[in-house]
Amino acid sequence: MGLTKTEIFTDEQNQLATLLKAMAHPARIAILQRILISNTCICGDLVGELGLAQATISQHLKELKNAGIIQGTIEGVSICYCINPKTWKLLEKRLGAFLAEYKGETTCC
Amino acid sequence: MGLTKTEIFTDEQNQLATLLKAMAHPARIAILQRILISNTCICGDLVGELGLAQATISQHLKELKNAGIIQGTIEGVSICYCINPKTWKLLEKRLGAFLAEYKGETTCC
DNA sequence: ATACTGTATCGCAATACTACGATAATATTA
DNA sequence: TAATATTATCGTAGTATTGCGATACAGTAT
């Protein structure tokens, strides 16, 4: 086995899981934070700032891009990555709805 | 290699990554939603509702429990799982702060 | 004690993830 | 064109994840 049975779940569940998975790594969280802070886009500066090899950073960027969370455009010599507004809004919506389902600590366990 | 270099990142980044990872699976999202909807706790009903084997469900529950997202107490014959309010609030706080960092689509890529 | 019900754990097979060096691809500059 | 700088991709090693059958464990009931 070894692969998730996506056909069992709804599209929304699969989509949210994919987005969360793309962010579920400290390096990718650090990358996103870095992009969010320096409002303007960044590029290979990450390699120097995080303590990871260039190949590893590139791989993490690819995963974020595949998930649609970031987008990259060629900016002269290097490449400029930034948040994909559409996906970010979708993420806020989906996650917000998910987290808001919690009604507070009702008498239970 | 094969293991995340957690020592490179901050505790907050690692913690958020761990929480996201615990939720980054459609089955675990479905389990959480099930718990959130039936405000009262549930147990092995999941096995019948999701199309996964009992061992698999138990494993997913264990991961959610290890991450501190849910907690379980013995309820007569079966076991009652419910949201861990403390972790849920932490998650809302961390995720909220993270998502709120986005300033909207500034001129960039 | 025995049988039964509900969970957890073990062990396995298939696959995915993480990290990196080496190398290729792309674009700019001399 | 050649040299340089920046990214991407390939291949690999080590580890983790997913799913499940089989089995062990815990509590209830007979």
Image (cartoon, coloured by chain):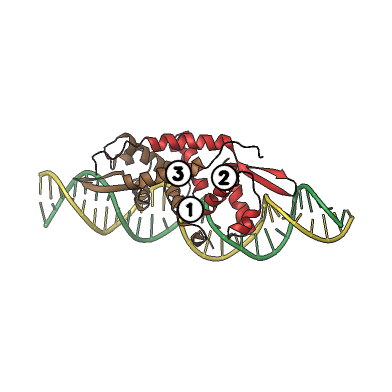
Chain colours: A red, B brown, C green, D yellow
Is D28 or B40 nearer to us in this picture? B40
- Labels 1 and 2 in the same subunit: no
Is D20 or C21 nearer to us in this picture? C21
**Separation of disc 1 and disc 2 at Cα?**
14 Å
Local packing at callout 1 (Cα closer than 10 Å; few below 14, some 14-19, many 20+) is: many
Which residue sits at x=45%, y=42%? B96
Q: Is residue A50 above or below residue A18?
A: below
Amino acid tagged 3 = Leu
Q: x%, y% of residue B30?
A: 39, 39
Answer yes or no: do the residues labelled 3 and 2 have beta carbons within 8 Å?
no
What residue did someone put label 1 on?
B13
Amino acid tagged 1 = Gln
What residue did someone put label 3 on?
B95
Quarter in which the N terminus of chain B is drawn: bottom right
Q: Is residue B31 above or below residue B19?
A: above
Which residue sits at x=41%, y=36%? A98
Which residue sits at x=62%, y=60%? A53
